[in-house]
Image (cartoon, rainbow, N blue to C red):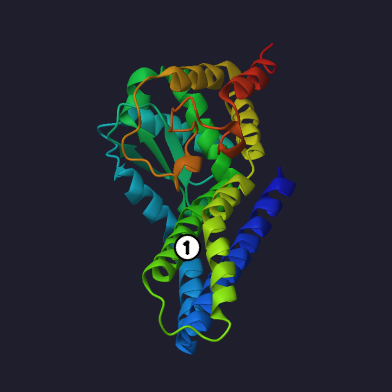
């Protein structure tokens, strides 16, 4: 587990380095095409600022995108007790608890480290799961926090979004403007457009690089924490079988949730941010005596 934590921390810095490189590459294409050196400097500035922002504020951005609101202990006393008991058992600080006003059962954890972590759950999760199943879900999210998965997963929300925005901006400028291009800019433009068309795929692969194995690891850790793997297995069955679609969800934040919030049956498993629920349940059931 400690090895996985170290790997996650290294992957966070690697992700920042890759992101900065991609944004600078975009800036160079812009500056070369339009003979404006300041565009490259601006791109470098954006890359550095967004990397800083993704580390410090991406949890707030994720919570904002999901529409999560800080929970009141008085209104959600049972949820608070479940979170408190499991964090004490895991030796972690108490995370902030948020509620998403949605009937679709789901949950996610976010934050750069255990001291700045938050757990968000939907009202549907609280209504449709019993206490044992809820404990399994919360234990899963606490395991993500303990393993520093949330650092990598949450940073990806901002980094991938910026890459997609820059890609769209470049393609639009190439499509609608043809002026002030440098000599040889035609070849560079073609290379740039191909590169930018591949950027959304690159963004998807970055999210997939946030290995789906982390979900298996968090499932196993949750089973050890609760000593009741059947609770999480039953919760995953209920969540995956539920017909309610999560309303406020973005492709940039889908990987944060315990179960893929997009319930489309046509989604290719190759590009799924989560391993198949059936495989997760199967592994959990092997832990049940």
Locate residue 286, reporting x and y percent: 70, 16
Left or right: residue 173 versus residue 208 is left
According to the picture, the residue beneath numbered tag 1 turns out to be 167
Q: Residue at (27%, 34%) from the top-left corner?
A: 101
Does 263 appear above or below 142?
above
The picture places residue 227, in percent across and down from the top left corner, at: 61, 22
206 to the left or right of 157: right
> In the rendered image, which quarter is residue 233 located in?
top right
Please tell me which residue lies in front, 2 or 277: 277
Vertical relation: 241 (above or below) 181: above
Screen quadrant of the C terminus? top right
| Occupied quadrant, residue 21 | bottom right
Seen in the picture, residue 121 relative to 64 is either above or below; the reply is above
Where's residue 243, x and y in %? 37, 20
Label 1 sits on a secondary structure element that is: helix
Quadrant (top left/top right/bottom left/bottom right) for the N terminus: top right
The answer to whether residue 209 shows anywhere in this view is: yes
Q: Relative to residue 116, is residue 121 drawn left or right?
A: left
Residue closer to the observer: 124 or 199: 199
Q: Quadrant of residue 249?
A: top left
Is residue 228 in view?
Answer: no
Of 247 and 164, which appears nearest the observer?
A: 164
Looking at the picture, how far across and down is residue 38, in whole percent? 46, 87
- In the current view of this chain or complex, which residue is farthest to the top? 289
> Looking at the image, which residue is at 48% across and 20% down?
235
Asked whether 61 or 241 is in front, the reply is 241
């Amino acid at each position: 587990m400690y090895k996985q934590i170290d790997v996650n921390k290294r992957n966070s810095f690697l992700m920042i380095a890759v992101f900065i490189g991609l944004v600078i590459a975009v800036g160079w294409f812009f500056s070369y095409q339009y003979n404006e050196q300041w565009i490259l400097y601006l791109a470098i500035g954006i890359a550095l600022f967004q990397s800083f922002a993704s580390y410090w504020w991406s949890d707030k951005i994720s919570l904002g995108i999901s529409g999560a609101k800080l929970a009141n202990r008085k209104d959600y006393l049972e949820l608070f007790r479940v979170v408190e008991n499991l964090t004490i058992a895991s030796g972690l600080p108490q995370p902030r608890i948020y509620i998403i006003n949605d009937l679709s059962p789901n949950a996610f954890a976010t934050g750069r480290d255990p001291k700045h972590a938050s757990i968000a759950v939907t009202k549907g999760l609280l209504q449709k799961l019993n206490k044992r199943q809820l404990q399994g879900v919360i234990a899963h999210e606490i395991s993500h926090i303990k393993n520093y998965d949330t650092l990598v997963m949450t940073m990806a929300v901002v980094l991938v979004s910026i890459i997609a925005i820059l890609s769209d901006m470049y393609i639009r400028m190439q499509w609608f403007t043809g002026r002030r291009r440098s000599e040889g800019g035609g070849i560079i433009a073609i290379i740039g457009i191909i590169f930018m068309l591949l950027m959304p795929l690159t963004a998807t692969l970055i999210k997939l690089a946030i290995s789906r194995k982390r979900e298996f690891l968090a499932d196993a850790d949750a089973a050890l924490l609760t000593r009741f793997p059947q609770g999480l297995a039953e919760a995953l069955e209920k969540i995956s079988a539920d017909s309610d679609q999560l309303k406020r969800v973005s492709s940039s934040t889908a990987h944060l949730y315990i179960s893929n919030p997009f319930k489309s049956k046509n989604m290719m498993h190759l590009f799924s941010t989560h391993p198949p629920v059936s495989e997760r349940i199967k592994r959990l059931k092997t832990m049940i005596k």
